[in-house]
Image: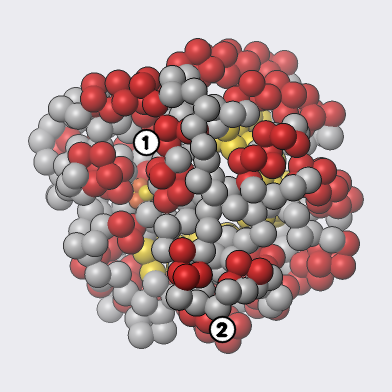
Amino acid sequence: MNDPAIDPPLAILLELTHRCPLRCAYCSNPLALTPRSQELSTAEWCAVLDQAADLGVLQIHFSGGEPMAREDLPALVSHASSVGLYSNLITSGVLLDDARLGALVDAGLSHVQLSFQGLDDVVADALSGFKGGAARKCEALARVQAAGLALTLNFVVTRQNAGQLEAMLQYAEAQGIARVEVANTQYYGWALQNRAALMPTETQLEQMGHLVDTWRERTKGRMVIDYVMPDYYGRRPKACMGGWARRFLNVMPDGTIVPCHAAQTLKHLEFPRFPASTLASAWFESPAFSAYRGTDWMPEPCRSCEAKERDWGGCRCQALALAGNAATLDPVCEFSPKHQEMVMLARRESQSGEVKLQLRHLSFAKTASPDADAAL
Ligand code: FES
């Protein structure tokens, strides 16, 4: 039975597939990617959408991998619309042609979040492992605008492309984009593997901070710029996912239901899986979802901190990755005994010069079919 003391999730992110034509070195997908053969079927994803609507969820984010790698994406968007859900497509844009966009518009898609690694081919191709992606993304952006869909341009920042931020903002302004997200890479999944290669320097951060301030002032009323700082240089943690199991949940390609994209690194927790578990029972009854919900789990000094109901203790996955314990302080917090160590690590790694990027790959490919990477 649903616990009335727990609010239902506001939004659900569906990682429809881990297949993707890009191989971004900063991808937050898990290192062990799910093969196509283990993805939920169309009927199963529709059942997930039905349950989301019954739970009172408002928004569905169709994500991946590249969600457009699923041929049934228009059918899923159409089903989401039919049960009253607002649909957002999180995409690289490289598969978005007129016919496919038309089908999504007809299905009731409301919003597109289009990611860029920059406009310079050399850097963008190196970060994404995809040749000529920038031009394809610019074409996709024009198509989305022509279709009249709401659009957010997402510029993912790393040490390699931080110097291109101004060019990216100029491009967004020239295209009349109303919302831009400038997001420093968060270090999960493949990004964590590539951290030494991707970490921006403090000088780059300072320059980007000034640039964002200047541009916010200059484009006030025309363009909203959201800026996501890299955690490692912060002093207080972010409320990761708005707090563990407070507002959002993710469904992985194989139906595993998790509170955040990196949750499966918390090996001591057992996450429920659809269809054996419903979304409601995962959210309200699963011990994994209640493990770090609210403030009862918090150690000191989090428990006595005046920010505990704003940051909800930061990120559990980061606490595990950097401090070796998911139930301890997020080292981003200046009160963590690990904080200084983490800042020094970021400084050191940001100065490591040119480090070879390890592009994302289907690690199961050794045992699965050799065409797994070309499964699109
Ligand atoms: Fe899992 Fe932050 S990514 S709690």
Q: Position of residue 243 (x, y in %)?
A: 33, 48
Residue underneath mark 1: 238
Which circle marks residue 112 in the picture? none
- Which residue shows up at 49% across the image and 32% down it? 355
Taking 40 as reference, is 306 above or below it?
Answer: above
Q: Horizontal placement of 40 versus 261: left or right? A: right
Is 206 drawn above or below residue 337 in the view shown?
above
Q: Residue 218: horizontal and vertical position, in percent? A: 72, 16
Q: Is residue 112 left or right of residue 307?
A: right
Q: Residue at x 25, y 33 (%)?
A: 331
Nearest the viewer among 109 and 98 is 98
Q: Report x, y in % for residue 97.
A: 84, 61
Q: Are marks 1 and 2 in contact (CB under 8 Å)?
A: no
Taking the spot 62% from the left edge, 61% from the top edge, the residue there is 20
Which of pointers 1 and 2 lies earlier in the amino acid sequence? 2
Mark 1, secondary structure of its residue = loop
Amino acid of disc 1? Lys
Q: CA distance from mark 1 to mark 2?
A: 35 Å
Image position of 109 (left or right of 99)? left
The colour scheme applied to this rendered structure is secondary structure
- One can see residue 239 in this view: yes
**Residue at screen point 72% across, 34% down:** 122
Residue 90 as seen in the image, left or right of residue 15: right
Specify the label residue 41 is tagged with. Answer: 2
Residue at the farthest left position: 300
For the residue pair 28 and 124, the one nearer the viewer reads as: 124
Q: Amino acid at mark 2?
A: Ser
